């Protein structure tokens, strides 16, 4: 005798199919917690250190030197890069051929963009006051991030990634116009905190 309760109805069957579809898409696109949260955490920690050093009016809010703030940001971004790379490797294992090549070239573009940014900023920054030199480094690095997020969205037809790049570009532009203190604050809160919230929302949404 068959137990009718053990046979799923149409609604339950559709729900299971949708759950499997969402899980498959999530595996192919990668875990948003690994793609967005690490960078958000790095920016929240690192740019908060810069904000405490510069303040909004040029007076520090905490005894943190420029070198210490930079060290905090760089260390946080190195860790974030490692975690994000882990996410890319996991996603790449599920794809072959053209998708793998796109991922590899995109990774090389990140390295090339950051290297070129470092060369240009290191050439220009010695000619500027310390605060403006820091703003050059911060603004140009976030510019590279914004452009590559938008490019990644275009490559993989991922609107959430594209609009993440647009958001980074908009916040970065506003911060550069307002000065280093505001740039650090806006980047920490709107980009750092924003990326963390977005990663949790995307993970929950599936």
Image (cartoon, rainbow, N blue to C red):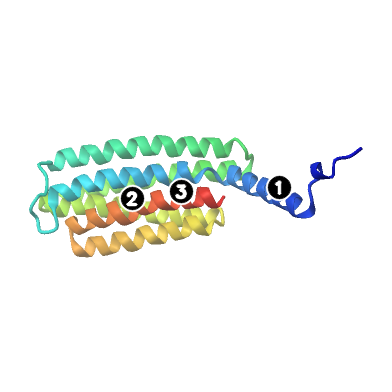
Q: Position of residue 139 (x, y in %)?
A: 26, 55
Q: Residue 200: which disc? A: 3
As helix, strand or loop, the secondary structure at mark 1 comes to helix
Q: Is residue 54 above or below residue 97?
A: below
Q: Is residue 172 above or below residue 34?
A: below
Question: Does the image show residue 159?
Answer: yes
Q: Position of residue 51 (x, y in %)?
A: 18, 50
Residue lying at 33% horizontally and 50% vertically, measured from the top left: 192
Q: Which residue is the site of mark 2?
A: 192
Residue lying at 74% horizontally and 55% vertically, measured from the top left: 11
Q: Residues within 10 Å of mark 2 (few under 14, many from 20)?
A: many
User: Alpha-carbon distance for marks 3 and 2?
Assistant: 13 Å
Farthest residue to the left: give it.
59
* Apparent side of residue 158 relative to residue 76 in the rendered image (left or right): right
User: Alpha-carbon distance for marks 1 and 2?
Assistant: 35 Å
Q: Residues within 10 Å of mark 1 (few under 14, many from 20)?
A: few
Q: Which residue is the site of mark 1?
A: 16
Task: Point out the frontmost of discs 3 and 2.
Answer: 3
User: Alpha-carbon distance for marks 1 and 3?
Assistant: 22 Å
Residue lying at 41% horizontally and 52% vertically, measured from the top left: 197
* Apparent side of residue 135 relative to residue 155 in the rendered image (left or right): left
Q: Residues within 10 Å of mark 3 (few under 14, many from 20)?
A: some
Sequence-first tag of 1 and 2 = 1
Instruction: Work out whether residue 114 or residue 179 is closer to the camera in this orientation and state it.
Output: 179
* Apparent side of residue 173 relative to residue 156 in the rendered image (left or right): left
Q: Quadrant of the N terminus?
A: top right
């Amino acid at each position: 005798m068959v137990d009718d309760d053990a046979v799923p109805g149409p609604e339950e069957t559709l729900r299971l199919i949708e759950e499997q579809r969402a899980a498959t898409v999530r595996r192919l696109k990668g875990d948003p917690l690994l793609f967005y949260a690490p960078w958000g955490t790095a920016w929240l920690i690192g740019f908060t250190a810069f904000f405490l050093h510069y303040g909004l009016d040029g007076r520090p809010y905490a005894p943190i030197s420029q070198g210490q703030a930079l060290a905090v940001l760089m260390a946080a971004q190195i860790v974030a890069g490692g975690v994000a790379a882990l996410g890319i490797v996991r996603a790449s294992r599920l794809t072959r051929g053209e998708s793998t090549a796109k991922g590899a070239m995109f990774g090389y573009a990140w390295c090339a963009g950051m290297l070129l940014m470092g060369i240009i900023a290191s050439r220009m920054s010695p000619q500027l006051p310390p605060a403006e030199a820091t703003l050059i480094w911060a603004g140009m690095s976030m510019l590279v991030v914004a452009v590559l997020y938008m490019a990644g969205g275009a490559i993989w037809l991922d609107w959430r990634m594209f609009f993440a790049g647009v958001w980074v570009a908009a916040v970065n532009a506003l911060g550069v116009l307002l000065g280093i203190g505001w740039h650090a604050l806006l980047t920490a809160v709107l980009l750092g905190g924003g990326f963390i919230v977005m990663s949790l929302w995307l993970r929950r949404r599936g």
